[in-house]
Image: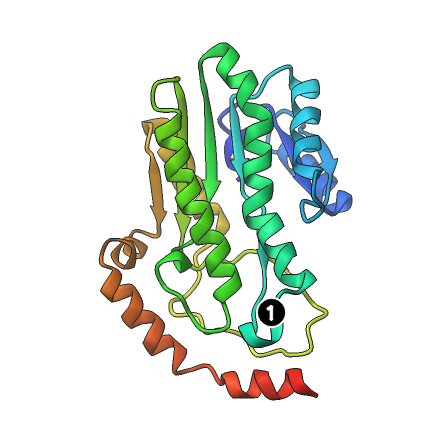
Amino acid sequence: MALALSRQGAELVVVARREGLLNKLADEISHAGGTSPRVLAADLAEPGSAARVGAHALDALGGVDIVVNNAGANLTGPQSLIADSTFAREVFEVNLWSPLALTAALLPAMHAVGTGTIVNVTSTVQAVPLPLLGYYAASKAALAQATRSLRLELAETGIRVLEVVPGSTDTALRDIDELPWKTKPPRTLPPVSPASTARAVVRGLQRGATRVVYPAYSLVPLEIPVFGRLVATVGGRRVNTLDALELGAR
């Protein structure tokens, strides 16, 4: 996403947990002819970090035209084992609370100039609730609803809100490694590349879209809920949740 935006001339602040990867990304952007971005290492699983990121971005750039809430944390496993754990709260902190907090931190500056764009990345799992993905799906569904509500709140302000709904994408989504079970949810369709998804997002920004669904066939379960439930049911048959429960009980 950062590379795609830099090719459009954007001046960026990029944020991730690992500073080494951020510096590598900054070098890649510079070598591709873009403006070297500011890098900020921050763990969005920590409450309060998103607001600090917003303050840093405003200090570094003097204002923000576009915020892309693209950080994501994954958690797979039976809900009876995850329960009200630190792992579960981390997923919601990264996937829901941090995007909301970062947006809130930047909105006053956008209101002051009467323009801006907020991009929230949700997921097709909001309509395809696969087994072992309950917490991840719930966090993304909550962000999707918050995004639509925010769009209505900002309808008369000049600030745009874009929801990006990717299907299965080949990304290094933040995963939690300390869990006692290793059963993975099924992939219902082959993943697409992050680069192609990013290009679709840039096209959506250029045409003033309110929602970008990529790949296009992912629109089907979103618009026809019964199809999404069917995909989840069929895909769920390929998951042995009993194995995960047994591993977690050891």
Q: Is residue 10 visible?
A: no
- Measured from the top left, where is residue 25 in percent x and y? 67, 40
- Measured from the top left, where is residue 244 in percent x and y? 58, 83
Residue at 54% across / 39% down in the picture?
A: 69
Residue at 33% across / 76% down in the picture?
A: 233
Tell me if 24 is positioned left or right of 117 in this view.
right
Location of residue 164 with respect to 174 vertically, above or below: above
- Measured from the top left, where is residue 21 in percent x and y? 72, 46
Q: Which residue reaches farthest top?
A: 113
Could you say which quadrant of the image residue 226 lies in?
bottom left
Number of marks: 1
Closer to us: 217 or 81:
81
Q: Which residue reaches farthest right?
A: 20
Q: Which residue reaches farthest front?
A: 84
Location of residue 158 with respect to 68 vertically, above or below: above
Residue type, mark 1 in image: Ala
Could you say which quadrant of the image residue 22 lies in?
top right
Location of residue 40 with respect to 243 vertically, above or below: above
Location of residue 51 with respect to 80 vertically, above or below: above
Residue at 49% across / 50% down in the picture?
A: 194
Q: Is residue 58 visible?
A: yes
Which residue does the numbered mark 1 point to in the structure image?
A: 83
> In which quadrant will I find the C terminus?
bottom right
Residue at 70% across / 68% down in the picture?
A: 177
Tell me if 52 is positioned left or right of 32 in this view.
right
Helix, strand or loop at mark 1: loop
